[in-house]
Image (spheres, rainbow, N blue to C red):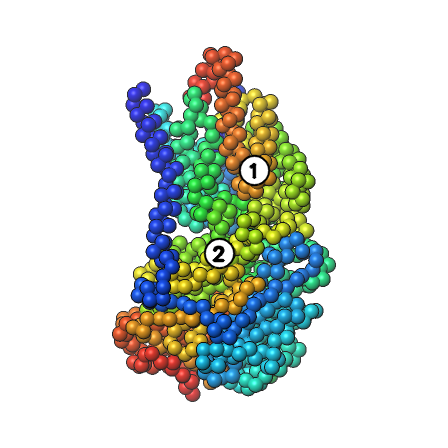
Amino acid sequence: MSERTTASPVHPAAGTSARKSWLSLDNRYIAPLFITCILVGGHLSFGMLESYQKTALAIVASIATDTVLGRIFSGKWPNVASAYITGISVGILVRSPAFWPYVLCSVISITSKYVLRVKGRHIWNPSNFGISALLFLAPETVATLSIQWGNYLLPMMVIWALGSVIIWRLRRFHITGIYVVSFIAFAFLRSYITGSPWQSEIAPLTGPMYQLFIFFMITDPRTTVRSKKGQCIVVFLVAFAEFLLRLHQVVYAPFYALFIVGPAAMLIEMWMDSRRSPSVGARAGASAANA
Amino acid sequence: MKQDRTARIIVSILFVGMLAAPLVIKWEAARRGRGGQANLDAQAALARHGFYFQEVSHAAGVNFVHQAPTLDPQLAPIMPQVASMGASVSVVDFDGDGWPDIYVTNSGEGSKNALYHNLHDGTFKDVAEELGIADVNQPGTGVSMGAVWGDYDNDGYEDLLLIKWGRPELYHNDGGHGFTRVTEIAGLPPWVNANTALWFDYDGDGLLDFFIGGYYSEDVDLWHLKTTQIMPDSFEYAKNGGRKYLFHNLGNGKFEEVSAQAGINSRRWALASAAADLRGTGHPDLFIANDYGVSELYFNDGKHFHDVSAQTGVGFSPKSGMNAAFGDVLNDGRYAVYVSNISEDGVLIQGNNLWMPKEGTAGDGLQFENLARDLGVELGGWSFGAQFGDLNNDGNLDLYLTNGYVSLDRNRSYWYDFSKIAGGNSIIIIDAKNWPAMEGRSLSGYQQKRVWLNDGAGKFINVAQAVGVTDTYDGRAVALVDLWNRGVLDAVVANQKGPLLIYKNMVTPENAWIEFALEGTASNRSAIGAQVTIYWNGQQQRQEVSGGSGFAAQNDRRVHFGLGKDPHVEKAVIRWPSGKVQTLDHPAVNQILKIKEPA
């Protein structure tokens, strides 16, 4: 969820044209702008934030950590857009009466980028890692947003429409689309297996948590495989893993599914790259390390 | 390169440390809480905490077990969670003999409510049947959800306002010898799905008025559903609940419904309400705790209510409000408000709210901040009723909280399905037929209660297990009352589909106390709204006679102050609802003072 901005899909050649360069810059900040709009709109209309302070704390902690670690490991000041998204995601998704989870989740998320690396690439989506870790380690203090932002149709439609346009522009709509279709299919299958009303199986998808999950987290370019076909397969497997977890009544199934499937897919891709041609794998690793 | 590797090792170690941090925090919290949670015998509890509870309901002759209603068959799959309220308790001295009695509601169709008459010897006798207020849950009339008592005609005897999912009822107390149903004469509506009500004299005319807060919409008959779309349209922002009623006492046995004129138009899902004068205006302000949404606070100018929820800070961060109780927890003459919510490990951590007045704010600029975490009263499971009271007479208000929602199969939880549907869109969540069947599963069942002891230094410590509160029933209502005029607060707890519990309190005799039994003359005779401030040992504490607080509960109308060891009481100041101020210099301690409002 944190990497959308720095991995603009715009081709490097586009940088030669001033217009395209401007567009590229624009693309880098589309996701932060969108998520900020979600935050501001959600809070002004529904008071969705636990508190301003907690969200601000998450953002500041995220940016500060990324700035320090980026400076240490790359020797230059990193672009803060990525850390901003991580922070704001933590600020929205984490729900706790305490302050410390917001700081800790942000710091763990960002640090995971620098620590959990294979061949120069980090393999977990940072905020997915941080949130999953806290949900697992501190369930008595931390929950995630699952019921905030009202349950009304209009905000949902607006976010889905805006999110779809943006994700289309960033050429990753296929990931969101495959996931949504898979989720719905698996929802009906779960309904058939468990006897629960199909509406209740579809219900999570219509909630605010999923809006963030499907537009930001599963589409993160840095922690998804590179080929379009591979992305489709992986996101289907995320939905399938979630299906299995939901059959076992795991409340935070989507986070855990991505936590499990995402890195596995990355590792498989790296392994296949290295088998195909050692130089390709090395180049991919070097490229990712410099990104 | 070497530097880079060193940095990576250091950051990796820090990373592991951060992952371990929640576990360390959890371990430390558990270690700190262990002291207050150890089971102690009575003597050890008295020595360590200054009090001990003993559950005495059977010995006291009280064998009441609450029954839940059976609603429309269309709700059968989720019946345990829909039919999950109705156990209530209210304290009243209905015959004016100076000994508090207990009224409890039942909610099964055809079941009977009970009025336990205090026999002064440690036992009670149910007299509801003979006095005519037992058989109030007949099919077609709805079932009881709560009751509050107030002397609306100032004849010296407390009258009964009974709220139901169904037809609300008003019973006139005929001199303590019987009750006459005056519902139609009083002008009550034919059907309200209510879970909260209170008596207060909002306009200061010396006559008690009353407020009723609707939960389900009043056009829903839960036994004969026209549609299954009766559930909240949002888990945290729902506005499709029942309407609110404000009945102005006309003084001739009749009431006029004036909520719209007075400015109360909410359709949130009210579960609890309480009134107190928060600004020193002489008029009681109204606090409403709402399920599926934010709480509401109305400032009362004596004629109109002004919604100040947002400006005061309490109308922020929607939760599942189930309790409203006022308490001067810092002994500074200002009331905090305690609102209970839901906390379930790994699923939903709303945390309860302790709304404390912000430093430097007062009057119309009054603001609140939630300090439940700082003071240690935040996590109480699926919390329901809670009341403030000085349980060990040390001079600080403690907090008794009951909890637990649906206790069925201990090994199977409904939480996964609950969280699934709660996050869904309004068109899904609003329809009961879309909710997964409970199939005998528990939802935050079998929970341990909280008895939070105020250390007087800004912290509360849970000592429930240590002081003998060990039940795990699905608690709903709590009332604190000096049942046997001993100068201590006993606790009476109403449990959903469970027994009525009477926790008799044994308090260390070293700590002094004083109680005030007030009777209004120019003010309403129940003295509801009268404030007593006691000044002792360089500190003060303020309490107010309440016409209903907590969840579906009403405490003893007498106000009780613990004073600690060897207190030097400077004075007690009574501000009557009429505005009269009465000062008692150096009142003697360890007594119940009966005070009549001076002419």
Amino acid residing under circle 1: Leu
Q: Is residue A281 above or below residue B203?
A: above
- Say which residue label 2 marks: B447
Residue B75 placement, left or right of A15: right
Q: Is residue B37 above or below residue B423?
A: below
Q: Is residue A168 above or below residue A212?
A: above
Q: Secondary structure at mark 2?
A: loop
Rendered location of residue B170, percent (x, y): 61, 77
Amino acid residing under circle 2: Gln
Rendered location of residue B173, percent (x, y): 57, 82
Kindly indicate whether the residues beneath marks 1 and 2 are on one polypeptide chain.
no
Point 47% across, 41% down: residue: A135
Q: Quadrant of the C terminus of chain B?
A: bottom left
Q: Which chain letter matches label 2?
A: B
Q: Nearer the viewer, residue B262 or A203?
A: A203
Point 37% across, 57% down: residue: B38
Q: Count the marks: how many?
A: 2
Rendered location of residue B413, percent (x, y): 55, 49
Q: Secondary structure at mark 1?
A: helix
Q: Quadrant of the N terminus of chain B?
A: top left
Within 10 Å of disc 1 (Cα), the crowding (few <14, some 14-19, many 20+) is some
Q: Quadrant of residue A86?
A: top left
Q: Nearer the viewer, residue B94 or B206?
A: B94
Q: Is residue B282 visible?
A: no
Residue A228 placement, left or right of A137: right
